[in-house]
Image: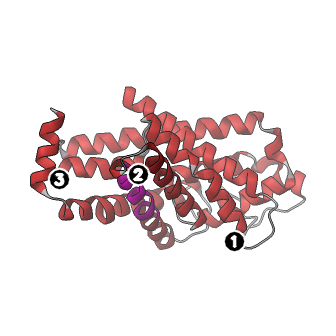
Amino acid sequence: MSFLLYSIMGGGMTAFGAILGLSVSAGVPWPGIPNLVMGVVFGFSLVIILISGASLVTADIVLGITGIFHKRISWLQFLLFIVVSYIGNAIGSMMVSLLVYFGGSGHSTASWLLRARQIAASKTGLTDLQAFAMGIFCTWILQTAVVLFFLMRSETGKITIAYYGPLAFVAGMTEHCIANIGFIALPILQQTFFSEITGKVLTAAGPTAQLSWEFSQYGWAHNQIFTLMGNFVGGAVLVGLMIHFISNPHRVMLLYKSFI
């Protein structure tokens, strides 16, 4: 239960970072700058998560697979670890989305709605392979930053590297399953009055595509399943497995003994 609550906290902070990123980038006209601005303000999310001890499923994938390699947990424990982490993150992210939906009058302006739908449509409009590939890329960047966070000796170093990871994956337009809940869920919730406020007609595809919760293209579930699969491969294989093979087993066991 404690881990579930930590996961809810982590999901909430991630969704808030996504919504904050949309808020500050709405209406910015210059190519590339909106994504950079989003990344700059999103960076605080991972700092809060790591400093507070909250949980994020993509980080838990790396930590869990490392625990298996070091024979600290079983595959069954790892599976439960990941499932609970994802459920908690999803709950926290949806809670923030609902709070903004019901109370965020500033998030109902035409510029905000257009920016939010543009991002949501671009993410849900990806093919299966595109979402999977960009999910791999995301956790390769982000979880390398998490590993470096634990290697830093100073608080300044920890905060700096934890801040840079989210900045890179958001500005780089990659796919993160929990961040995408914040990026996609709120535009779906706001869909009923999108056309009324912006004057735009919902279309079958493109920046003004009609979104859904379904497994079809432009569906939230479709993006989640392939992004999560990519996040798992990126975290477990390109970060966790690589670090396992380059680590010194003798030094690892000495570290574990020092903690006992």
Q: Which residues are magenta?
A: 138-149
Q: Secondary structure beneath disc 1?
A: loop
Residue 212 lies, in percent from the top left, at 64, 54
Query: Foreground residue, 202 or 124?
Result: 124
Mark toward the start of the polypeptide (2 vs 1): 1
The disc labelled 2 sits on which kind of residue? Thr
Residue at the disc numbered 2 = 58
CA gap, disc 1 and disc 3: 40 Å
On-image quarter of the N terminus: top left
Q: Residue at x 71, y 67 (%)?
A: 33
Secondary structure of the magenta portion, mostly?
Answer: helix
Q: Which mark is residue 32?
A: 1
Does the magenta portion include 146?
yes
Q: Is residue 5 above or below residue 218?
A: above
Q: Nearer the viewer, mark 2 or mark 1?
A: 1
Can you say which quadrant of the picture contains the C terminus? top left
List the residue tagged with mark 3. Answer: 69
What's under tag 3, amino acid-wise?
A: Phe
The structure residue drawn at horizontal position 75% and vertical position 47%, both measured from the top left corner, is: 190
Q: Give the crowd class for mark 2: few <14, some 14-19, many >=20 residues within 10 Å.
A: many
**Left-right relation of 93 to 231:** right
x, y (%) of residue 87?
44, 39
